[in-house]
Image: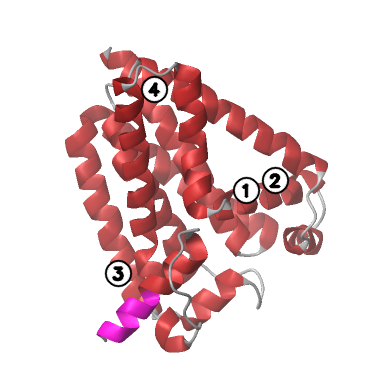
Amino acid sequence: MIKELFGGLLVAFGLYSALPLPQIEWKDNTMRYALSFLPLIGILVGGCEYGWLLLAGKLALSSLLYAAGAVLIPVVITGGIHLDGFVDTCDALCSYGDKEKRLEILKDPHVGAFAILWIGVLLMVQLGMFAQVYETPASAKLLCLGYAGARALGGGMIVTQPCAKNSGLAHIFADSADKKTVSHVMLVWELVLAVLTVVLAKGIGVLAIAAYAGFYCFHIRMCRRNFGGITGDLCGMCITVCETLMLLCVVIGGIILR
């Protein structure tokens, strides 16, 4: 059991982070519980974000320099894997094709014009919001938990929702996972993070939880309607948008409490 858990930890960090860790072969026993460790990567990202905010304040950096570093932290730690899902999903949705066409676009390794447009919009919005967080950091502690919460929802999708196709990373992980155990673990993650979020951020924490829950329900319906289920890219889209919603809540909290 310990060996399986450690193997799952290495698989999760090996795929969903860019950290230089030992590579491990993907087998049923190493992938059975791998998704359970996905929120730990979010805790690492959130901790680095909050640490960077404190360091930038100590060094009296400009808000623009802080914001640029804050936008880059998740990309450096994760290798941009969830952003890849975001841009692929934007390309597919903006194609206005049928279900099969959208799934083909998700699989296509090329980047389309809509992907470039929407990743530019996303990063610009995040840059502006991080700059505002630097000026009004009253709710910034939410950064420590928001990235983990986004990954708890994204990972939970894989073991609780039907896959849109019988290939791809989502299908591989869903097929190899102990779905019952992993779904229970993800639920525990979500409940614990929700409680801590309310303790840390009070009313703004409740707003963040509501935003996550509302978008998650909307996203699941969108996936079923437009794709027939979920894929790895669609999970990446969910994680990326939830992170941005969390950042928006931090901005709102900072403005209200300044």
Q: Amino acid at mark 1?
A: Phe
| Residue 137 locus on image (x, y percent) | 31, 22
Residue 217 visible in the current orientation: no
Colour scheme of the rendered structure:
secondary structure
Q: Amino acid at mark 2?
A: Cys
The mark nearer the N terminus, 4 or 2, is: 2
Q: CA distance from mark 2 to mark 3?
A: 31 Å
Report whether 157 appears left or right of 180. right
Residue 113 painted magenta? no
For the residues labelled 4 and 3, say whether their Cβ atoms are less than 8 Å apart: no
134 vs 164: above or below: above
Magenta stretch: give its range: 2-8
SS category of the residue bearing label 4? helix
Q: Quadrant of residue 119?
A: top right
Which quadrant, please, contains the N terminus?
bottom left
Mark 1 = which residue? 86
Mark nearest the camera among 2 and 3 is: 2
165 vs 245: above or below: below
Q: Quadrant of residue 12?
A: bottom left
For the residues labelled 2 and 1, say whether their Cβ atoms are less than 8 Å apart: yes
The mark nearer the N terminus, 3 or 1, is: 1
Q: CA distance from mark 3 to mark 1?
A: 26 Å
241 vs 129: above or below: below
| Residue 187 locus on image (x, y percent) | 30, 61
Mark 2 = which residue? 90
Mark 3 = which residue? 184
